[in-house]
Image: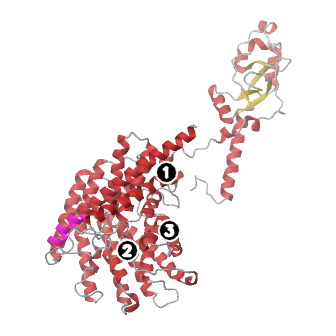
Amino acid sequence: MHQRLAFFQSTSKWLILGSIMGVLSGILGFLFVLAIDLGSHVFLKCVVGLDLMEADGSKHLFTGMQHVAFSPWTLLLVMFIGGSLVGLLIQRLMPNDTHSDADYVVNSYHNHKGQISWRFWVGKVFAALGTLTTGGAAGREGPTILIAGGVSRVLATRLRMSSRDRRLLMIAAVAGGIAGVFRAPLAGAFFAVEMLYFESDLEAEALIPSFLSAIISYCTFGLLQSFIYPDHSITQSLFAIPDGLLFEAEDYLQLLGYLGIALSCSAISWLMRSSIDFGKSVMKRIVFIWLRAGVGAVLVGVLALAVLNISQFYALVPEGSVVPLSVLGDGYGALQYAFHLDFQHIDNHLSIAALLVLIAVAKTLAVALTVSSGNGGGKYAPSMVIGGCIGGAIGLLLSGMAVAPPVSACIVMGMGGVLAANYKTPIAALLMVCELTGDYSLLLPAMWVSALSFLTSGRKGLLPSQVRSVVHSTAHNGHFFSDIMATIRVEKVFNREKNTQTLLPSSTLDECKKLITDTHQNIYPVVTNNGIMSGIFGMNDLRSFLYDESLGLVVVAQDIATTDIITITTEDSLTTAMRRFTERNLDALPVVVSDDDWTFLGLLTRREVIAYYNNVVEDIREKRKEDGYLDEAKA
């Protein structure tokens, strides 16, 4: 009855809380996207004259409105001002915090019981707005995760939730944030439970709340978009991807092409991580945080303009194309441009491949500059762009070969591969591929690329706060504790055949002295003729009788023994035995039939229990080694 009641309470609780979290994540994510849309229109379109390409699934309130002619110098000025203001905000609210948005959530889960600091929350959200609306190379998913996580903290505090439920609610909020913004509910749910660990582990306990939050957020976000943009479908995916991307059994040679994509994704992931680390070591030399952020933003702008000029000089793009400027912002325009190309009817494959590689490398450096200088925003969307460009370039280079997959499929696989490598989320990456394409016809190569990218990219990702697995998370301290001694009865250790010397209650003092001299026991049971223990004594009990010879004529064992005895039975556990050993610092315990029947069976020594425990632990270690697990102390 109690189990059924607990089940229904848990089910009802997470059905309600997951749904609430999904609605809030969808609404707040949509409002955040609208705020970016408004800011980008004001600063980039109206001031700079730059209209960046977007994914077909992205909608804007101000599409088609007039704006000024593009001015590179104005772009650099706007980016410097935006970066400097972001730096001032960071300097004011969190000058010493080096966590990114998603990494802060991971750290909060493991080390802070799901608590999110309001100073960090406010600082990072507005810093992301400042960065994203002025052209910084970042994505909107990181701030969206943080927004949803902050709301989960408010809800958990109001409801006085336990630390466990607070953590689960925060993960559900992350799932909702990703699902709404990326239009990928299943990938969002799995990303939330996978991103906590850098090995192939996930937070299974949070999976169902994440499912609920993700699907509700996905629907809420879609309904809001369809309400404001009548031509927008609720289920429209982020990118418009060509139809006919199939993989069948006879295409097995294409797996070699996909292998090249997976290895390239690992390489570009390493470059991305190394660039960020190097950038941080260089940027920290600029003492003033506001200047550091401003300089970083300007360098991103210079890099984007350099890519634009190189592309135009070598005729990699038509005159007037802004595709090379996908180095700025989230960069989705570069992927949508590649998806729209008819690769079967173009003859400049090498030029397009060169453009995609150029954008991928430049985007990698731009993200490193943005992050290392302290500007806001996430790295999830840029990772997808970088991976997609690398995948598309490899697909173009392989065109015409037997191992060549469709170029559009290569783009999608590259997106998933870099996500798996950067965030250590192989399941979420392959699901993202399937949800972006709208079907599961590429499931097999998606599994192939995600697994290989994950395995070949090393243990380090873009989230330093990730831990190895559930067992290594401080959030689960004590959850996996196993009291080995509690599972072993005294019967297993106790040797009934061992010879234990006892005394009769009527034994003389001389007999007691002789027993102490002739044996190595520490305690001496006093047992009646019918086998019932009536007392017990040790050397300290006997000491006061040793120097008075007259007492030897009248004192017997029963006079020396104490009846305040701690006993143990064969049905007790070794944990109970060790607890009783330590109560009075005893080296041996008398074993009796039961607490009510003091029929003496023998003595159990502390040394015997410890030796048995050591043998059991050693057997477990040997079994772990045989099964391929490392000893935890050496891992």
Q: How far apart are marks 3 and 1 (CA)?
A: 21 Å
Q: Is residue 334 above or below residue 616?
A: below
Is 37 magenta? The answer is yes
In 3D space, how far apart are the residues under numbered discs 3 and 2 (Cα atoms)?
A: 16 Å
Q: Which amino acid does label 1 sit on?
A: Ser
Q: Nearer the viewer, residue 434 or 92?
A: 434
For residue 319, side relative to residue 104 (left or right): left
State the residue at coordinates (82%, 25%): 501
62 left or right of 116?
A: left
Estimate the x, y position of residue 379 in percent, counting from the top left.
35, 65
Can you identify the residue that label 1 sits on? 473
User: If you read the primary sequence from the N terminus, does the residue marked by circle 2 or circle 1 appear first?
Assistant: 2
- Counting from the top left corner in percent of width and height, residue 444 is at 54, 74
The relative height of residue 502 versus residue 426 in the rendered view (above or below) is above
Query: Which residue, given by chain and number where applicable, does mark 3 sit on?
Result: 454
Does the magenta-highlighted stretch encompass residue 588? no
Q: Give the range drawn in magenta.
A: 36-46
Left or right for 181, reference 537? left
Residue tagged 2: 386
The residue sitting at 35% across, 45% down in the picture is 155
How far across and down, in percent of the image, does residue 41 sit?
19, 68
